[in-house]
Image (spheres, helix red, strand yellow):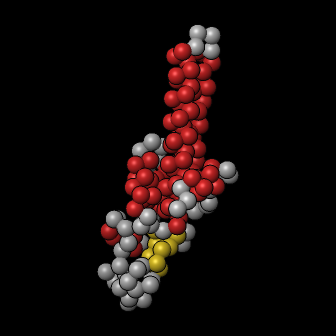
Amino acid sequence: MEDFQSGKKIIPTGDWGDFSTRRCANESFTASLETGEKVPIPKTQLILHLIPVIGFFPSLWVVYRHQASREQLAVSRLSITLAFTWLSSYLLLATGAATSEFFTLRLLILNSFFTSGYFLVSIWLVVRVLQGKSYRLPGMSSLAERIFRK
């Protein structure tokens, strides 16, 4: 595949084929292994990882393989941390609501707040990636990096 502006060959990285060769002003770049050229990372890959619940699985695959850019790894770690935090709080609150007689309604309402918050934060992060802004969350991003450190 050739870049018609410079006449050099561009080798796509990742599993996205031709989508990784598009150039936009606010997309991140990763270096091609063979030529050393900068090849952009499509926003669609980052957005895929930030989709609530569904994005957990491609994120897990990226973290398992360790063959991605730093930005993809950071977004994947954040996505996995958010999903595990939501799932654990969901299960704990649902268990507490099932076993409690007095706090049942309060725990179910709190559970719905956590679920709504998880979805809203994920959608907010998708919008921030589309705008080209930072995808980092205070506290959660650093926690994700500490958990998934080598």
Left or right of 119 on screen, residue 3: left
Q: In x, y percent, where is residue 93?
A: 56, 25
Q: Image point 52% across, 22% down: which residue?
A: 95
Q: Image point 51% across, 50% down: which residue?
A: 79
Q: In x, y percent, where is residue 138?
A: 68, 52
Quadrant of the frame with the N terminus: bottom left
Q: Quadrant of residue 65?
A: bottom left
Q: In x, y percent, where is residue 71?
A: 53, 64
Q: How many marks?
A: 0
Q: Would residue 115 be seen by someone viewing this image from the given angle?
A: no
Q: Quadrant of residue 37?
A: bottom left
Left or right of 78 on screen, residue 20: left
Q: Residue furthest bottom?
A: 7
Q: Residue furthest front?
A: 150
Q: Image point 33% across, 70% down: which residue?
A: 18
Q: In x, y percent, where is residue 64?
A: 41, 58
Q: Residue furthest top?
A: 101
Q: Would residue 59 be seen by someone viewing this image from the given angle?
A: yes
Q: Image point 45% across, 58% down: which residue?
A: 63
Please, is residue 12 above or below residue 16 in the view?
below
Q: Nearer the viewer, residue 74 or 44?
A: 74
